[in-house]
Image (spheres, rainbow, N blue to C red):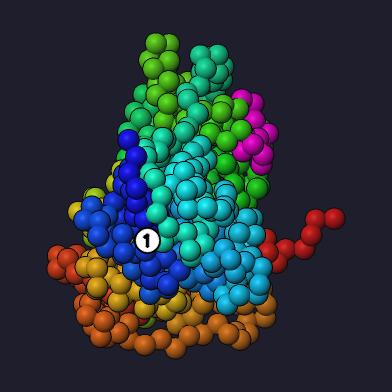
Amino acid sequence: MSERLQAGAAAVAVLRQAGIDCVFGLLGGSKLELYDAIGAAPDIAYIGARHECAAGHMADAWARVTGKPGVVLGAQSGPGVSNLVTAVAEAYLAYSPMVVIAGAITRAHLGRDTFQEIDQQALFAPIAKRSIMVPTPERLPEMLGEALRVANAGRRGPVVLHVPRDIFAAEIDVGPIANLGANVAVGGPSAEQIGALLAMLQQASRPVIVAGGGIKWSRGSAALAALAEALDIPVVAATGHADVFATDHPLHAGQAGPRGNAVASGLTRDADLLIAVGTRLGFNSTFHSHDYVTATGRIVQVDVEAAAIGRHFPVALGIVADARQTVVALTEATDKKGLDGTSWSAWSKGFREARARLRLERDGEGLIAAMPLSPLRVLAEIRETLPDDAIVTLDTGAMCLQAADRLRHGAAPSLITPLDFGLVGFGYAAALGAKAAAPGRPLVAVMGDGGFGMTTIELATAVQYNLPVVAVVIDNGAWGAEKAYQRDFVGGRFPGADLVNPPFGEVAALFGATGYAVDAPGDTRQALVQALSERRPAVIHVKVDRDAIASLRKDLFAKPVA
């Protein structure tokens, strides 16, 4: 059964069929009919950002929390759409399902150097799964349905749907759309593949599981924990996915690689069997180096994307399958075989001892009483204060790189980071989107001063739409990562590195949020407890030691290998 609707209302009907109950955007004249239909839809909330890029990050985070495609109403044609490029690129490299409904100029004006005309379809083509121009009003429902399906199919990603200005005003017939937004994923592994993996386990004495975003997207955290417990195998999290299951679990080693810790890196380097589930073993986790990935052990890789398997490291067994289904199948098979971890008991015992030493070291960071305030003390206070059900968002940068392996997380999804795009300025806008997706969960954005300064205006969005996110801004007065490079590799001169910041707590108060100023040990904990209890948008501005910047990666400055 179909009904006749204005195309803007038809788009809303498609979103409703797909189960989308919240959209993000910034009002633009190229889609007023769509906005009018959103305003008349009591079952679809709208959150308007102050910058299109922030709206994109909100939708990205909303998608990661809900598992549905995040939808952005991409403002005006031309500059409004081009402002979304960074957000789309971020989602593309994070494999995050997002659909941008991008305004475009009227069809009759195409190719005439019209006001705000750019080739926006080509602009997005390299950084989206699809960049599609809607040719007629009648095709809009079908193509929007296709965008939602493609964004969430297999290896997820953003789709940009360009809609000319005149299309939204037309009247069209609209019927049911099939497969709206449903994830079209590959199935589980074959019995032969599980048998081959079991045979490798029976020969192993130093096995480790490396788990990534595939576990989170498939909602496989509980299944992963059950497998780790059944086999007594330590689990290392891929970078940005420390929440693959609860970090307090005794078999959770944390992150490996340059953004991780020495215990986890030792596991992945020294393993004789590395089982990579739902992870590409990509650059952020490994630097494509055997410093962090076994050079002599066997690697088994499980991914929904066949092209990802064996791309960076040779594999003994590749399995194109869903991460959770693979973990469940392996657990059932090991139960039948009676495999219990006896063969690697010394390996697991050594891991537990090393993990205990690392936790003691991290606990000691919470006792640092030196002034100026140590950022490690601040991170320890955040870790101790975070509720079990909290969601944390991070930026990229010196402070957040130190935070990435130091905070605590419950079951996924509870950590949202920029992942491979390495974007500074992502964390606060992402926190607002995550809060819209999970209003009952505490939401904390951990930011550096540079990144928060990029998105301070979105405090207005938090206040206007009552999104009680707590931003902890760790202020060292610098672009810290770059300053570390300048200090360690470029002669200790710091042009462009230092920042002069406003009192962010007072700025927050001007927006109508709550502000806190912190500069002493213990104060971050107290402020965070208070801010979370008030359930209002808040900013905790923490002044830390300007010289306490961790040394970062050296490969950027290494001489090429002859």
From the viewer's perspective, tell me whether residue 115 is left or right of residue 405.
Answer: right
Q: Is residue 335 magenta?
A: no
Considering depth in this image, is 103 or 350 the residue closer to the camera? Answer: 103
- 274 relative to 526, above or below: above
Q: Residue at x 34, y 51 (%)?
A: 5
Q: Residue at x 47, y 25 (%)?
A: 187
* Numbered disc 1: secondary structure: helix
Rendering quarter of residue 387: bottom left
Disc 1 marks which amino acid? Leu
* Residue 411 image offset from top left, x and y in percent: 31, 43
Q: Residue at x 21, y 68 (%)?
A: 466
From the viewer's perspective, tell me whether residue 545 is left or right of residue 197.
Answer: left
- 17 relative to 324, above or below: below
Considering depth in this image, is 561 or 386 the residue closer to the camera? Answer: 386
Q: Main secondary structure of the magenta part?
A: loop
Task: Tell me the quarter of the image containing the N terminus.
Answer: top left
Q: Is residue 312 magenta?
A: yes
How many numbered circles does the render carry?
A: 1
Rendering quarter of residue 315: top right
Q: Which residues are magenta?
A: 307-317
* Residue 149 image offset from top left, x and y in percent: 46, 41
Q: Residue at x 60, y 41 (%)?
A: 293
From the viewer's perspective, tell me whether residue 419 is left or right of residue 513.
Answer: right
Residue at image mark 1:
34
Residue 148 appears in the picture as rendered: no
- 274 relative to 133, above or below: above
* Residue 485 image offset from top left, x and y in percent: 61, 73
* Residue 9 image offset from top left, x and y in percent: 34, 55
